[in-house]
Amino acid sequence: MSRAATVALVDYGAGNIRSVAKALERSGLRVDVTNSPAAVRAADGVVLPGAGAFADAMANLRSSGLEEAVKQAVEAGRPYLGLCVGIQVLFDEGEEHGITPGLGLFGGRVERFPEKDAEGARLRVPQIGWNEVRFQGEHPMLEQLPARDHYYFVHSYRPVPTDSSVVAGVCDYGGNFAAAVANPSVFAVQFHPEKSQHAGKRLLDAYRSWVETRR
Protein backbone atom coordinates (compact mmCIF):
# COMPACT_ATOMS: atom_id res chain seq x y z
CA MET A 1 0.00 0.00 0.00
CA SER A 2 1.36 3.42 -0.93
CA ARG A 3 1.93 5.93 1.82
CA ALA A 4 -0.51 8.73 2.44
CA ALA A 5 0.36 11.99 0.75
CA THR A 6 2.33 14.39 2.95
CA VAL A 7 1.47 18.07 3.05
CA ALA A 8 3.57 20.81 4.59
CA LEU A 9 1.40 22.87 6.93
CA VAL A 10 3.35 26.11 6.97
CA ASP A 11 3.96 27.34 10.51
CA TYR A 12 4.67 31.06 10.21
CA GLY A 13 3.19 32.02 13.56
CA ALA A 14 -0.53 31.73 12.71
CA GLY A 15 -2.69 30.86 15.68
CA ASN A 16 -4.84 28.02 14.33
CA ILE A 17 -2.21 25.52 13.22
CA ARG A 18 -3.35 22.69 15.48
CA SER A 19 -7.00 22.73 14.40
CA VAL A 20 -6.02 22.82 10.73
CA ALA A 21 -3.57 19.94 11.21
CA LYS A 22 -6.25 17.78 12.87
CA ALA A 23 -8.74 18.55 10.11
CA LEU A 24 -6.24 17.59 7.40
CA GLU A 25 -5.41 14.37 9.22
CA ARG A 26 -9.11 13.49 9.39
CA SER A 27 -9.16 13.74 5.61
CA GLY A 28 -6.39 11.14 5.34
CA LEU A 29 -3.32 13.31 4.84
CA ARG A 30 0.01 13.07 6.61
CA VAL A 31 0.73 16.52 8.03
CA ASP A 32 4.17 18.00 8.56
CA VAL A 33 3.77 21.15 10.63
CA THR A 34 6.92 22.98 9.64
CA ASN A 35 8.76 26.27 9.40
CA SER A 36 11.49 24.69 7.28
CA PRO A 37 11.78 25.99 3.71
CA ALA A 38 13.33 22.67 2.64
CA ALA A 39 10.37 20.71 4.02
CA VAL A 40 7.93 22.98 2.19
CA ARG A 41 9.75 22.43 -1.10
CA ALA A 42 9.84 18.65 -0.58
CA ALA A 43 6.21 18.04 0.40
CA ASP A 44 3.51 16.62 -1.89
CA GLY A 45 1.35 19.67 -1.16
CA VAL A 46 1.47 22.93 0.77
CA VAL A 47 -1.17 24.36 3.08
CA LEU A 48 -0.94 27.93 4.31
CA PRO A 49 -3.47 28.55 7.10
CA GLY A 50 -4.54 31.91 8.37
CA ALA A 51 -5.18 33.85 11.53
CA GLY A 52 -3.99 37.37 12.13
CA ALA A 53 -2.96 40.25 9.93
CA PHE A 54 -1.63 40.30 6.35
CA ALA A 55 1.40 42.43 7.27
CA ASP A 56 2.42 40.15 10.15
CA ALA A 57 2.01 37.05 8.00
CA MET A 58 4.20 38.43 5.22
CA ALA A 59 6.85 39.65 7.68
CA ASN A 60 7.09 36.16 9.20
CA LEU A 61 7.14 34.42 5.82
CA ARG A 62 9.94 36.68 4.59
CA SER A 63 12.10 36.56 7.71
CA SER A 64 11.99 32.76 7.83
CA GLY A 65 12.73 32.09 4.16
CA LEU A 66 9.30 30.53 3.75
CA GLU A 67 8.17 33.12 1.19
CA GLU A 68 10.50 31.83 -1.53
CA ALA A 69 9.91 28.20 -0.54
CA VAL A 70 6.13 28.56 -0.95
CA LYS A 71 6.54 30.28 -4.31
CA GLN A 72 8.95 27.60 -5.50
CA ALA A 73 6.57 24.83 -4.44
CA VAL A 74 3.73 26.44 -6.38
CA GLU A 75 5.93 26.97 -9.43
CA ALA A 76 6.89 23.27 -9.25
CA GLY A 77 3.21 22.31 -9.40
CA ARG A 78 2.73 21.24 -5.77
CA PRO A 79 -0.96 21.70 -4.90
CA TYR A 80 -1.30 24.74 -2.67
CA LEU A 81 -4.28 25.22 -0.37
CA GLY A 82 -4.62 28.66 1.18
CA LEU A 83 -6.99 29.33 4.08
CA CYS A 84 -8.12 32.82 5.15
CA VAL A 85 -4.84 34.80 5.34
CA GLY A 86 -3.49 32.01 3.13
CA ILE A 87 -5.57 33.36 0.25
CA GLN A 88 -4.79 36.99 1.00
CA VAL A 89 -0.99 36.71 0.87
CA LEU A 90 -1.19 35.35 -2.69
CA PHE A 91 -1.96 38.83 -4.02
CA ASP A 92 0.27 41.74 -4.95
CA GLU A 93 -0.43 43.69 -1.80
CA GLY A 94 -2.65 44.10 1.24
CA GLU A 95 -3.76 47.29 2.97
CA GLU A 96 -4.15 45.95 6.52
CA HIS A 97 -1.81 47.87 8.89
CA GLY A 98 -0.44 49.79 5.91
CA ILE A 99 0.29 48.73 2.34
CA THR A 100 2.37 45.52 2.40
CA PRO A 101 3.62 43.56 -0.63
CA GLY A 102 2.31 40.00 -0.86
CA LEU A 103 3.59 36.94 -2.72
CA GLY A 104 2.44 38.36 -6.05
CA LEU A 105 1.16 35.06 -7.41
CA PHE A 106 -2.17 36.71 -8.26
CA GLY A 107 -2.73 40.24 -9.47
CA GLY A 108 -4.78 42.44 -7.18
CA ARG A 109 -4.92 43.61 -3.61
CA VAL A 110 -6.58 42.79 -0.30
CA GLU A 111 -8.95 45.52 0.87
CA ARG A 112 -11.13 46.09 3.92
CA PHE A 113 -14.85 45.62 3.54
CA PRO A 114 -16.62 48.93 2.87
CA GLU A 115 -18.52 50.65 5.69
CA LYS A 116 -21.80 50.27 3.78
CA ASP A 117 -23.29 47.54 1.65
CA ALA A 118 -24.43 47.85 -1.97
CA GLU A 119 -27.77 49.34 -0.83
CA GLY A 120 -26.23 51.89 1.51
CA ALA A 121 -26.92 50.11 4.79
CA ARG A 122 -24.18 49.94 7.42
CA LEU A 123 -22.11 46.77 7.00
CA ARG A 124 -20.97 44.94 10.11
CA VAL A 125 -17.23 44.29 9.91
CA PRO A 126 -15.72 41.77 10.47
CA GLN A 127 -17.91 39.19 8.82
CA ILE A 128 -18.26 36.44 11.43
CA GLY A 129 -20.34 33.35 10.81
CA TRP A 130 -21.73 31.12 8.11
CA ASN A 131 -22.29 32.26 4.55
CA GLU A 132 -22.90 30.61 1.20
CA VAL A 133 -20.13 30.23 -1.37
CA ARG A 134 -21.07 29.74 -5.03
CA PHE A 135 -18.29 27.98 -6.90
CA GLN A 136 -17.53 28.61 -10.56
CA GLY A 137 -15.08 27.63 -13.27
CA GLU A 138 -13.04 24.47 -13.66
CA HIS A 139 -10.52 23.02 -11.22
CA PRO A 140 -9.75 19.52 -9.87
CA MET A 141 -11.06 20.63 -6.47
CA LEU A 142 -14.38 21.78 -7.89
CA GLU A 143 -15.03 18.42 -9.54
CA GLN A 144 -15.67 16.99 -6.06
CA LEU A 145 -17.55 19.86 -4.44
CA PRO A 146 -21.20 20.92 -4.67
CA ALA A 147 -21.84 24.05 -6.68
CA ARG A 148 -22.96 25.82 -3.49
CA ASP A 149 -22.14 25.22 0.14
CA HIS A 150 -22.02 27.10 3.44
CA TYR A 151 -18.72 27.80 5.20
CA TYR A 152 -17.57 29.66 8.29
CA PHE A 153 -15.94 33.08 7.87
CA VAL A 154 -14.03 35.40 10.21
CA HIS A 155 -12.48 38.35 8.37
CA SER A 156 -12.46 42.10 7.85
CA TYR A 157 -10.51 42.08 4.57
CA ARG A 158 -11.16 40.36 1.25
CA PRO A 159 -9.19 39.86 -1.97
CA VAL A 160 -9.95 41.99 -5.00
CA PRO A 161 -8.35 40.24 -8.02
CA THR A 162 -7.49 42.22 -11.13
CA ASP A 163 -8.32 39.18 -13.29
CA SER A 164 -11.83 37.87 -12.74
CA SER A 165 -10.95 34.55 -14.41
CA VAL A 166 -9.05 33.43 -11.29
CA VAL A 167 -12.19 33.66 -9.13
CA ALA A 168 -13.33 30.13 -8.24
CA GLY A 169 -15.99 31.05 -5.68
CA VAL A 170 -18.15 34.05 -4.84
CA CYS A 171 -19.80 35.06 -1.57
CA ASP A 172 -22.24 37.90 -0.90
CA TYR A 173 -21.40 40.16 2.04
CA GLY A 174 -22.18 43.77 1.32
CA GLY A 175 -21.97 42.72 -2.34
CA ASN A 176 -20.20 39.85 -4.05
CA PHE A 177 -16.53 39.24 -3.30
CA ALA A 178 -13.99 36.58 -4.27
CA ALA A 179 -14.25 33.87 -1.60
CA ALA A 180 -12.04 31.44 -3.56
CA VAL A 181 -9.37 31.79 -6.24
CA ALA A 182 -7.57 29.15 -8.24
CA ASN A 183 -5.04 28.35 -10.93
CA PRO A 184 -3.55 24.98 -11.96
CA SER A 185 -1.41 24.77 -8.78
CA VAL A 186 -3.48 26.82 -6.34
CA PHE A 187 -6.84 26.64 -4.63
CA ALA A 188 -7.34 29.20 -1.89
CA VAL A 189 -10.35 30.26 0.15
CA GLN A 190 -11.24 33.15 2.43
CA PHE A 191 -13.23 30.96 4.83
CA HIS A 192 -12.10 28.37 7.41
CA PRO A 193 -12.70 24.73 6.33
CA GLU A 194 -11.45 23.50 9.70
CA LYS A 195 -14.39 25.34 11.33
CA SER A 196 -16.95 24.48 8.65
CA GLN A 197 -18.07 21.01 9.80
CA HIS A 198 -19.25 18.71 6.98
CA ALA A 199 -18.73 21.29 4.25
CA GLY A 200 -15.16 21.86 5.38
CA LYS A 201 -14.50 18.14 5.51
CA ARG A 202 -15.71 17.80 1.91
CA LEU A 203 -13.32 20.52 0.82
CA LEU A 204 -10.33 18.99 2.61
CA ASP A 205 -11.22 15.55 1.20
CA ALA A 206 -11.17 17.13 -2.26
CA TYR A 207 -7.76 18.60 -1.51
CA ARG A 208 -6.42 15.19 -0.47
CA SER A 209 -7.62 13.71 -3.78
CA TRP A 210 -6.02 16.55 -5.71
CA VAL A 211 -2.69 16.08 -3.96
CA GLU A 212 -2.79 12.30 -4.55
CA THR A 213 -3.37 12.71 -8.29
CA ARG A 214 -0.42 15.13 -8.58
CA ARG A 215 2.19 13.01 -6.76
Image (cartoon, rainbow, N blue to C red):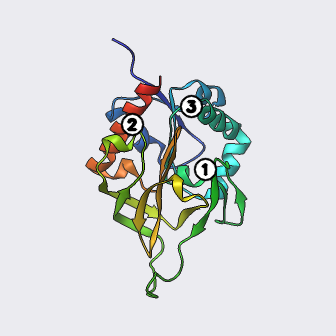
What's the mark number on residue 90? 1
- Estimate the spatial distance between the alpha carbons at disc 3 and disc 1, rounded to whole Å: 15 Å
| Above or below, 190 relative to 42 | below
Q: Choose mark 3 or mark 1, whichever is in front.
A: 3
Q: Quick one: SS at disc 3?
A: loop
Q: First in sequence: mark 2 or mark 1?
A: 2
Residue matched to label 3 = 77
Q: Picture coordinates of residue 67 (x, y %)?
A: 68, 41
Q: Residue at x 41, y 33 (%)?
A: 210
Residue matched to label 2 = 24
Q: Choose mark 2 or mark 3, whichever is in front.
A: 3
- Estimate the spatial distance between the alpha carbons at disc 2 and disc 1, rounded to whole Å: 21 Å
Which residue is most to the top? Answer: 1
Mark 2 vs 3: CB contact within 8 A: no
Q: Picture coordinates of residue 188 (x, y %)?
A: 49, 48
Q: First in sequence: mark 3 or mark 1?
A: 3
For mark 2, does the 10 Å Cα neighbourhood hold few (<14), some (14 to 19), or many (20 or more) residues? many
